[in-house]
Amino acid sequence: MRVELAIKNGKRSFKIQTKHGSLLTPLFMPDATYGAITSVGSDDLRNSGVEALVTTTLHIEQKIGSDYLEKYGGLHDFMDFHNPILTDSGGYQVFSLIHRNKSKNNMITDAGCSFTAEANGKFNFLSPEISQQIQHKIGSDIRVVLDEPVIEDTSLANIKRSVDRTTKWAKRSKQEFLRLNDLSENDFNDPKIDRPLLAAVVQGANNFKYRQISAEQLIEIGFDIYSFGGLPLHSKHSWKNDAPQGFYHELIAFVANLLPVDKIRYGLGIGSPDDLDYAYKVGWDIFDCVLPTRNARHAFLYVHKGQGDRSYRTYDVLHIKNGQYQFDKNPVDKECSCSTCKNIDRAYLRYLLKTHNPTGYRYATIHNLTFYMQHIQNLRNA
Ligand SMILES: [Zn+2]
């Protein structure tokens, strides 16, 4: 059985069987952009309790190359990370690139996305089929179909086009997925056949009607996982600044209710520990986000209640560069059992991060990842 669903006290929990071990939901996956989490190795990830990773297909293709990875034997061996890996479709990165760098070479048509790579100016093309081919060569356990995100405050015509295109691309992606894995449509629905899982992405921006149309059309095609289509992008600001924000409570609950009870729901890019709690409560199962790792490098540490300098609903944040920690010999978090909290104090971590020492990034990242993994474990046990 690839995916088993248990319902206890009204809460859904999936056991997901992959070639690289099984996973339980709720599940949080940190983002290993470029096939690595900056400053930590796979042994650090294991020790922090990380159960699965998300990696970005387009970055992997540009930095490592899927042909190279296929020849090497796949990303798991390359990274020495033998737990499940989810690859995104590359669509969000391409859309962001095209959105902030409008030129005649950068465009999205029904055929796919044409763009010039920022790093080397080389012309690239990403279609639903090519995205699946790259993910296949990477050897990921969970794959995502190419979709077309839109900015949140776009016109109705653009939302409609994005939903239509997302459906058409989802169909083409599934066909290519079946071809690459040598499967028929019947095989896809046969739980006895081992294969990677395939996720579709519900688009429709902030429009409830189009979210519903998108969900219905994707369910009709049939996937293992349905995702909440990114955090909609603003036209007014840089997408980078907006990415961690724009979390719409009402919309995310609405979309969860559109999706089948027995299918996994993936909250792409969610979120802070409080966002995770909420999204899980309204029916989402798996999550990924850059927050714990990116914030670690910005000296922004997640700690248990009563131990930080800023309080949120279920946790505190400790801004370790603040002067108040200069002589603080306490661990970052007294309730944390990570190697950072066991071995060094706040004063030393503050010094390392203030001087941009990579060792500081490693210590901070290990702590934040451990905090997130413990947080999701608590949700699972609740
Ligand atoms: Zn810790």
Image (cartoon, grey):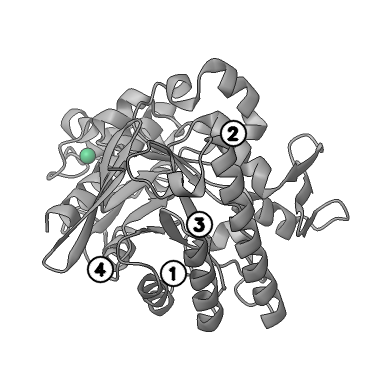
Place of residue 16 in the rendered image (x, y in percent of width and height, measured from the top left): 29, 44
Instruction: Please tell me which of labels 3 and 4 falls first in the chain.
Output: 3
* Distance (Cα) linking label 1 and label 2: 27 Å
Point out which mark residue 247 bears.
1
Residue at 62% from the left image edge and 36% from the top image edge: 133
Judged by depth in the image, the label closer to the viewer, 1 or 2, is: 2
Label 4, secondary structure: give it. helix
Instruction: Please tell me which of labels 3 and 2 falls first in the chain.
Output: 2
Point out which mark residue 325 bears.
none
Residue at 59% from the left image edge and 66% from the top image edge: 233
Locate residue 323 relative to residue 306 in the image: left or right.
Answer: right
Label 1, secondary structure: give it. loop
Observer-nearest of 9 and 184: 184
Instruction: Note whether 348 is above or below 156 in the view shown.
Output: above
Q: Name the residue under label 4.
A: 281
Place of residue 207 in the rendered image (x, y in percent of width and height, measured from the top left): 55, 80
Instruction: Please tell me which of labels 4 and 1 falls first in the chain.
Output: 1
Q: Mark 3 points at which residue?
A: 200
Instruction: Please tell me which of labels 4 and 2 falls first in the chain.
Output: 2
Q: Is residue 59 visible?
A: no
Total numbered labels = 4
Q: Mark 2 points at which residue?
A: 60
* Distance (Cα) linking label 3 and label 4: 21 Å
Residue at 57% from the left image edge and 73% from the top image edge: 204
Label 3, secondary structure: give it. strand
Instruction: Note whether 249 is above or below 43 in the view shown.
Output: below
Place of residue 155 in the rendered image (x, y in percent of width and height, measured from the top left): 69, 80
* Distance (Cα) linking label 4 and label 1: 15 Å
Label 2, secondary structure: give it. helix
Name the image quarter holding residue 39.
Answer: top left
Q: Within 10 angstroms of label 2, few (less than 14), some, or many (20 or more) residues?
A: many
Q: Is residue 339 visible?
A: yes
